[in-house]
């Protein structure tokens, strides 16, 4: 496992452990208490913020917003019962396919 995958897995485990924590003490628990919709909304907001930082050419902001985006993506995974392993398997399935070929397979 790569260091990056290990970091994602570790963060995911932390998110899982905080899911049922006290929402007044844990931002993660607060997100879950608000439901999947709120988790997804935050993911979208962070994606937009990362995109804006990229357009502005602000590398430090891209890094910070990317970290926020990954965190909120993992929250959405947990909220929808998706695991990092599920996503890793999908990425492995796509390995070696061109983007055009992979997208064409989705529509069949």
Image: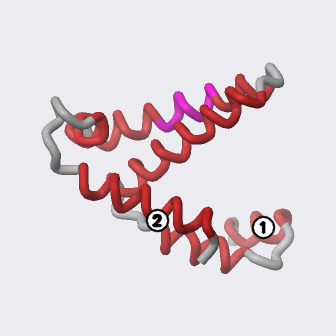
Question: Between disc 1 and disc 2, whose residue precedes?
Answer: 2
Is residue 17 shown above or below 63? below
Residue occupying the point 35% across, 34% down: 38
In the image, residue 107 above or below residue 35:
below
Scheme by which the image is coloured? secondary structure
- Report the residue at 66% width, 31% height from top: 50
Residue drawn at 46 percent across, 65 percent down = 9
Which one is nearer the viewer's eye here, 39 or 58?
A: 58
SS of the residue at dot 1? helix
Which mark is nearer the camera, 1 or 2?
A: 2
Q: Residues within 10 Å of mark 1 (few under 14, many from 20)?
A: few
- Residue 25 among magenta residues: no
Image coordinates for residue 83, horizontal then vertical, percent = 42, 67
Quadrant in the rendering for residue 56: top right
| Residue underneath mark 2 | 9
- Find residue 67 and report its image quarter: top right
Secondary structure that dominates the magenta span: helix
- SS at badge 2: helix
Quarter of the image with the C terminus is bottom right
Q: Is residue 83 left or right of residue 105?
A: left
Furthest-front residue in view? 3
Q: Which mark is residue 23?
A: none
Left or right: 19 with respect to 57? left
Magenta span of residues: 43-49
**How many numbered dots are placed on residues in this image?**
2
For label 1, the residue is: 104
Mark 2: few/some/many CA within 10 Å (<14, 14-19, 20+): some
Give residue 68's position: percent from left, percent from top: 53, 37
- Marks 1 and 2, how far apart at CA: 30 Å
């Amino acid at each position: 496992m790569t260091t990056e995958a290990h970091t994602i897995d570790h963060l995911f485990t932390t998110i899982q452990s905080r899911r049922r924590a006290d929402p007044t003490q844990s931002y993660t628990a607060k997100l879950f208490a608000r439901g999947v919709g709120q988790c997804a909304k935050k993911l979208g907001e962070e994606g937009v913020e990362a995109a804006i930082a990229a357009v502005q050419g602000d590398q430090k902001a891209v890094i910070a917003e990317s970290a926020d985006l990954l965190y909120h993506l993992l929250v959405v995974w947990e909220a929808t019962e998706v695991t990092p392993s599920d996503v890793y398997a999908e990425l492995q399935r796509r390995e070696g396919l061109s983007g055009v070929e992979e997208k064409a397979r989705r529509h069949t």
